[in-house]
Image (spheres, rainbow, N blue to C red):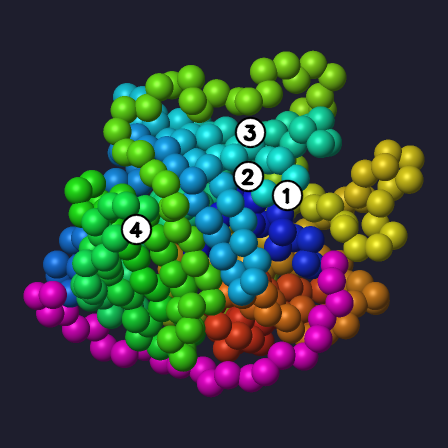
Amino acid sequence: MQQTGRLLGLLSLLSALFVPSAHAADGADAPTTESPSSAAAQAQLKRLQTAAQRLSYSGTFVYQQASQMRTSRITHILSGKSELEKLEVLDGKPREYIRSDDDVACYMPDARTVLIEKRVTRDVFPAILGASPEDLANHYNVSAGPEERVAGRDCQTIVLEPRDKLRYGYRFWADKSTGLLLRAQTVDGRGDVVEQISFTQVEIGPIDRSRVRPSYADTRGWRVEKSAMSKVDLSGWSVTPPPGFRKIQEVRRMISDTAPGGASPAQNRPAEREVSQIVFSDGLAAISVFIEPGSQNRNEGAVQQGALNIVGRRQGDYWLTVVGEVPAAAIRQVSNSIELKTK
């Protein structure tokens, strides 16, 4: 499960020094079976998926990872066939994301900057499902859990248990009245919650269009930047993702170097460098492979941050970084599979 802005945080980690991580066992697919209760839970998933896109709602939610917590407010409107959305980051540096269908504008008042970009995946809470329930059932055992309450509303819980050791499990709380996802947990192989996101207050129903307008009406003097991202053919690289993960994007982008010494004194802004990125997803989790010219100032190894696992290594003249919300075994498997094809 990712949130808007998570990718920017991931990219900053590409400049970090790596330390060794513990090993975990690889996994394999299990045969798909379906019971009546599983079919009912899949129907709940389909309703959950549809509700996030077709309902109008507004609420405050909290994202928690270990001891870190972040609070945001989202307002979503369905206007005809178009989606309008405003996501406000309420902790730390102010950030505001205004989305119209796949067009996203990120307002950064501290930097007096508006960043214009295209949405890549549908993975912003509560719209976190990017695959059909039928496809997810090929790699997760889907079942209904108990009825509970979240943010003052009655919910049906849905449990997704991975069929292998290459992905996490999930627990979802869907509003019984509307199907809207109100809480989601990411669970590791021991059953421990490694990541959680939950509404603390939510209203579902007609929303005035004025509530999705930018808070910063006067942006005269602000810098407007378009995301430097372009599609690219990376077929020269061979990457094998875990079963069920499909390639959804190949791009080349510019990223800011937030490592010490990365700032440009002349502009008082982070220096930028070009990387290529391949994105895979199974409809819930995403794995990104970043490829860039080799750096001599990095140590190979792995780090973990909540549900995120990251592996960085040198291959020939290139530096490879694999990042994903999957167990370390999956990230290591993907990293070991990467090859540059010879003509």
Q: Which mark is residue 190?
A: none
Say which amino acid is labelled 3: Ala
Q: How many marks?
A: 4
Of the residues under marks 1 and 3, which one precedes in the sequence? Answer: 1
Q: Is residue 223 above or below residue 271?
A: above
**Which stretch appears magenta?**
15-37
Label annotation for residue 92:
1
Q: Are marks 2 and 1 in contact (CB under 8 Å)?
A: yes
Residue designated by label 4: 150
On screen, 35 above or below 235?
below
The residue beneath circle 2 is: 89
Locate residue 98, reporting x and y percent.
50, 29
| Point 79% across, 55% down: residue | 259
Disc on the earlier residue, 1 or 4: 1
Alpha-carbon distance for marks 1 and 4? 25 Å
Image quadrant for the C terminus? bottom right
Magenta stretch secondary structure, dominant: loop
